[in-house]
Image (cartoon, grey):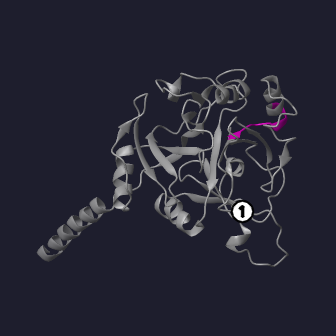
Amino acid sequence: MLRAAILACVSLVFSSFVSAQNPPRPKIYGIAFVRIKSSDFQKSSETYSKILGLTTATHGCVNVKNPCFVVNPVQHVELTHADAGDSGSWLDQVAFRTNSVEQMRDYLRAQGLLVSEIQATPNGKPLIETEDPEGNHIAFVELGRGETMAPLSPAQVSYRLFHAGFVVRDLPLMQHFYMDQLGFRLYWKGGFKDLPAGTPEKDSDIDWFEIQVPNGSDWVEFMLNILASADHEELGVQNHICLGVPNMEKALDQLHKNGLAPDSRLADDKSEIGRDGKWQFDIFDRDLTRIEFMEPTPTKAPCCNPYTAPHAHL
């Protein structure tokens, strides 16, 4: 009896030690904000405020000094200054909503990752910053799920930020970080080309690899097989954000009402059904960063592979 009690006590102490050494991962609900580089705040702001119809100075944009545009109470887009001609990605940072920044910091440090001290966003929310294995800047901010979302102004084209996409060179390395360590799950993967029936899919056949946050339906899109010599315009196509719309035809109508010229060089010619089976349409800000619009559910079967997780909702 005494021996059993001692063993139980030792087991409890050991379990507590292991738990302290390996703290649990807190929840990750979705994207909180995306920070995009801009060489001209005034010209870029015209795209986000006028063409997209996004409001400013409320919710997550309160006290933000640089131009900031509210998508909904828990999602926004910020601009940060860059000089025209700067190399590299102009998608400066992607921040995710979590239920505990302190727990997330402990968890990431236990995984051997470098993490900033806990900071405060301009509107007072706890935040930490880190980098993924390829140097993309990511952050975690303490915010709720934000399930109830609706347009904040009649001119607003979209009230939901679906995903952010960026160029990835080493898929297995990034899978380990986002999926094994952060708990993201596969949403969909596909490529430009159809494979002959019965042909096994190789990593080189995949051009888009999409992974959802563990506790929501927002996702990150890895843009694969991009040449290292890609120029600013090509990187602007690949490193992008995606806004969800319930109906593409109505979204296009609102974009044009907001001032998007039908023949603008900063917009695609027309909407189309992508390889993922969803209606899509692209415009570009003044620095050629792509802003994609997408309906939440496919209208036909996707190429290549089926979806493996629930679709986002509006």
The quadrant where residue 84 appears: top right
Q: Nearer the viewer, residue 207 or 155?
A: 207
The quadrant where residue 230 appears: bottom right
Q: Where does residue 68 sit, x and y in percent of width and height?
A: 56, 28
Q: Nearer the viewer, residue 204 or 289?
A: 289
Q: Magenta includes 306?
A: no
Q: Residue at x 49, y 48 (%)?
A: 138
Which stretch did the figure color magenta? 243-250
Q: Residue at x 43, y 29 (%)?
A: 122
Q: Quadrant of the C terminus?
A: top right
Q: Where does residue 185 sit, x and y in percent of width and height?
A: 58, 59
In the rendered picture of this protein, how many numbered marks are placed on residues? 1
Q: Quadrant of the N terminus?
A: bottom left
Is residue 75 in sight in this rendering? no
Q: Residue at x 67, y 27 (%)?
A: 43
In this picture, residue 250 sits left or right of residue 310: right
Q: Report crowding for label 1: few under 14, some 14 to 19, many 20 or more residues within 10 A (C-alpha).
A: some
Helix, strand or loop at label 1? It is loop
Which residue is identified by label 1? 207
Q: Nearer the viewer, residue 282 or 227?
A: 227
In this picture, residue 57 sits left or right of residue 226: left
Q: Magenta includes 247?
A: yes
Asked if 202 appears above or below 56 in the picture, the reply is below
Q: Where does residue 91 sit, x and y in percent of width and height?
A: 59, 45
Q: Nearer the viewer, residue 3 or 178?
A: 178
The quadrant where residue 100 appears: top left
Q: What amino acid type should be assigned to the residue bearing mark 1? A: Asp
Q: Residue at x 42, y 46 (%)?
A: 129
Is residue 51 in sight in this rendering? yes
